[in-house]
Amino acid sequence: MQCQPIEPFVVPLDSDARSLEEAGCWLGGAVYGQRAVAGRQLAQRIGERAAAACAVVDIVPLAAAHGFAELWRVAGEGPVTQGRHGPNGEITWSADASLLFAHLTLDEQSFGDGRHCALEATAHAAYQGLFDLLEHSGFIHPIRFWNYLPRINVDEDGLERYRHFNVGRHAAFVEARRPPDASPPAACALGCSGTALTVMVLAGRVAPTAVENPRQVSAYRYPQQYGPCPPTFSRAALYRSGTSALLTISGTASIVGHETLHIGDVAAQVDEALRNIEAVVEAANHAAGQSLFSVDGLKMKAYVRNAADTEAVRRQLKLRLPATPVPLVRADICRANLLFEIEAADSAMLRTSA
Ligand code: 3EB
């Protein structure tokens, strides 16, 4: 099967529809910054003119005054087809020959009884719906999930909401006969505003290779001190199809083993997270059997818990990665003591032995 290269691109919110079309073939992605009216408008333009599936994440961008979109561009002419899935058409998807991108936003208020935390049920339903789409579309292998959940660090019914989310996600994996501890896809999980959970997925027709970080305990083996169900993700996923490869690195923070390091020191957390990124890139190149990726070349995006830390984070990133622009958004991170999280992706051509 012939696979086309895919890359994430950051697009400023004031891009016009024509420049989007000229830029190539967009599969989908997300606008970060719902509050800006421009965000909704861009998502609509991208959806209509470029046939891409574009989510809107209610989050505060620190990168550009009006926010930005992160879009996944596929090479070639397409065709990119688009559709809806689910009983109420709540899932929007878009696909080319080898990759599918889908997203849905579920309002937690339509789940549960209004008195108890409904995030577990909402996460369960979101993953059920997306897994159903993957099975029906033939893109059965998730490569990467993005999760944005409101009030992520708030305790409800005696458990932090992120941990409720983990219970619902875990149950959906088990139910879909996708063992949570057998090479799960890459992922991230961040806070957002509002009352709705947004989940996005990139999926393929062939299984990606899961990549772990030798410096960290696999997240799906975290001990119970982090909640009744561990989070379901691998540190990175390496997707190879035809002559191209895509590496997508999960949300990466200042965690070594399973413990948070440098509590209260944002600059040191940035450094530690980047050491983890380096270790994951090395592990990915090892898994590929060739040196495909380098830290300098990665497309990155990062989350900062406290807006007041923005300049310190920028300074530290500039010091470590002088040539890599890293758009920032303000977001709560899934452990109250984490101040920073970074994610990355890149594509490469595989060297095939003649
Ligand atoms: C960590 O390493 C930090 O729950 O999907 C990173 C990436 C984190 C993904 C998820 C959580 C998730 O545990 C948090």
Image (cartoon, rainbow, N blue to C red):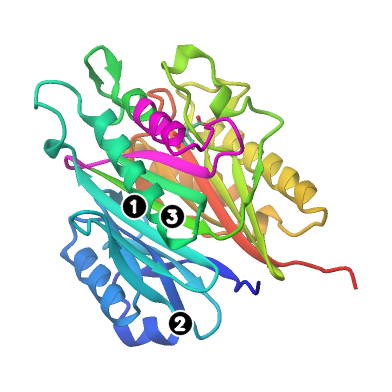
**Residue ID for mark 2:** 79
Residue 275: x, y in percent? 66, 37
**Residue ID for mark 1:** 62
Instruction: Looking at the image, tell me whether mark 1 or mark 2 is earlier in sequence order.
Output: 1
Q: Is residue 151 visible?
A: no
- Classify residue 51 as left or right of residue 101: left
- Asked if the stretch drawn in magenta spans residue 192, the answer is yes
What SS does tag 3 mark? helix
Instruction: Looking at the image, tell me whether mark 3 or mark 2 is earlier in sequence order.
Output: 2
Residue 346: x, y in percent? 60, 60
> Going 43% across and 30% down the picture, which residue do you hit?
170
- Classify residue 219 as left or right of residue 225: right
Q: What amino acid does circle 2 point to?
A: Pro
Instruction: Assess disc 1: are there few (<14), some (14-19) or many (≥20) residues with their C-alpha within 10 Å of its C-alpha.
Output: many
The segment highlighted magenta reads 167-196
> Going 29% across and 73% down the picture, which residue do you hit?
47
The reply to whether the residue tagged 2 has its Cβ within 8 angstroms of ligand 1 is no
Instruction: Looking at the image, tell me whether mark 3 or mark 1 is earlier in sequence order.
Output: 1
> What's the mark number on residue 134?
3
What SS does tag 1 mark? loop
The reply to whether the residue tagged 1 has its Cβ within 8 angstroms of ligand 1 is no
**Split into 4 quadrants, where in the image is the N terminus?**
bottom right
> Residue 269 or 104: which is nearer the viewer?
104
Residue 281: x, y in percent? 69, 47
In the image, is residue 153 above or below residue 36?
A: above
Question: Outermost residue, right direction?
Answer: 354
- Asked if the stretch drawn in magenta spans residue 191, the answer is yes
